[in-house]
Amino acid sequence: MSTATHAPAPARRGFRAMGTDVLLLLDTSRTGDAPDAPAVQQAFDAARAEVNRIEHIASRFDPQSELARLNAAGEAEVSADLLRLITLALAMRDATDGRFDPTVHEAVVAAGYDRPLDQLPADAGAPGPAMPAGGHVHVDTRTGRVALGTGTCLDLGGITKGWTADRVADELGVHGPCLVSMGGDIAVRGALHGEPWPVEVMHGDEPRVIGLRRGGMATSGTDRRRWLRAGAEMHHVIDPVTGRPSATDLLRVTTVADDAATAEAWSTALLLAGREGAAHEAEARGIMAILVATDGDVTVTGGLASAGDDVHGEQPA
Amino acid sequence: MTTDRSRRRVRWTAIGGTALVGVGAAVAIGANPYPHSDRPKDAAVQALETRESALATEARRVNALNAERWASYRVKLAERTRQIATVKAANAQALAASAATSSYSGGSSGGGSYSSAPAATYVPSAPVASSGSS
């Protein structure tokens, strides 16, 4: 760790996009570029442009976005990027037995999350009726044509952030080891001065640091993106079965996977599985996960604990 | 009788004459003594021909430009692919080296190589980012 301590800090760029904080870190020690060097700034500019481009494709709040137009029309020939996102989301719906489901759009809207979070009223009337997901989506990968079942709309919010982190990390990684965080959905390429990228993860109220060597990490939780409806607190993690904000006994789940998009889908799926189900499934599948229960209890799975012997104890010194 | 023969001769003469005139007319038309090029073209046809010619020229120009751009794209793509491969190899090498020497590279497999090192471990470093609910 001493290498990281004495090495220069990575070049950094932060901005807002997709309704969240975006952070780009680039280790320039190999190229010797200063953080403000034109080559580094150009790389950041290109990364930001890519984030904005994907947001314009997959935002459900922008009526001109490709996704919003598909939702409105019910059927369309979509771009290669949107096609990849939709097929990935549907593949993750299959892999997670429907707990991660991109067809929760109507349920999210019924719960009141119908505009960007910072534009939601302080409180509003009662939420709409429960809207169970599991909607039909037909995808023709040959022609790029997507047809949504009656009453089905797509919300790709979560997986888009992870997928964007992966895409941008691929691009930025050409210039050197990098970390891309889309509001906590993280993708890394290469090592920071030869060491894993240290990323803070909350264990209950206590911060811990995970060294991420490769792939991606994501956290889903019911403690963020909350709003009021008729005095009741709502959150954005919808249970596809009930069509309501989930009543899971987990507060937050962090997972590590080969890429951030997969990590994002599994963090949501495990959150919805509840404490016991998530621990069992994560161990069975070998998923590195940190499960934080609503009572503050922490369970670590998938071999992550063995590095620090830290299932319920203290962080290794 | 004389009258009948005379009438018949007149009739045959008329038929022969008509046939001769027909053949002559056919020969004259076939010879095309007034070719079209000598006549002024219809303005609409002329405009269409001009348009057709212009479109053909434009199509050749666009095809050439397209071919040029494709060639340029392929060169850039090959260069980009080489760059990515180089960076990936360098990153893999650096990670392998760090996994071999790192004090926290144990994990379930004992570490020692890039592929066998765990994707994530607890570390006592100061964080550079945080993973919260997105």
Image (cartoon, rainbow, N blue to C red):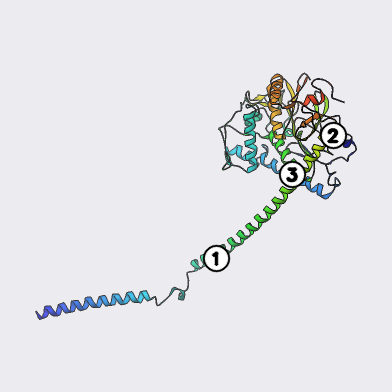
On the image, numbered disc 2 is attached to which residue? B101
Please give the chain letter of the residue carrying mark 3: A
Position of residue A4 relative to residue A291, above or below, is below
Per the model, the C-alpha gap separating discs 3 and 2 is: 29 Å
In front here: B104 or A234?
A: B104
Q: Amino acid at mark 3?
A: Glu
- In the structure shown, which secondary structural element does the residue marked by tag 2 occupy? helix
On the image, numbered disc 1 is attached to which residue? B53
Q: Residues within 10 Å of mark 2 (few under 14, many from 20)?
A: some
Q: In the rendered view, does B30 fall on the left or right side of A189?
A: left
Per the model, the C-alpha gap separating discs 2 and 1 is: 72 Å
Please give the chain letter of the residue carrying mark 1: B
Please give the chain letter of the residue carrying mark 2: B
Q: In the rendered view, does B10 fall on the left or right side of A302?
A: left
Q: Position of residue A127 (x, y in %)?
A: 66, 25
Q: Position of residue A305 (x, y in %)?
A: 79, 24
- In the structure shown, which secondary structural element does the residue marked by tag 3 occupy? helix
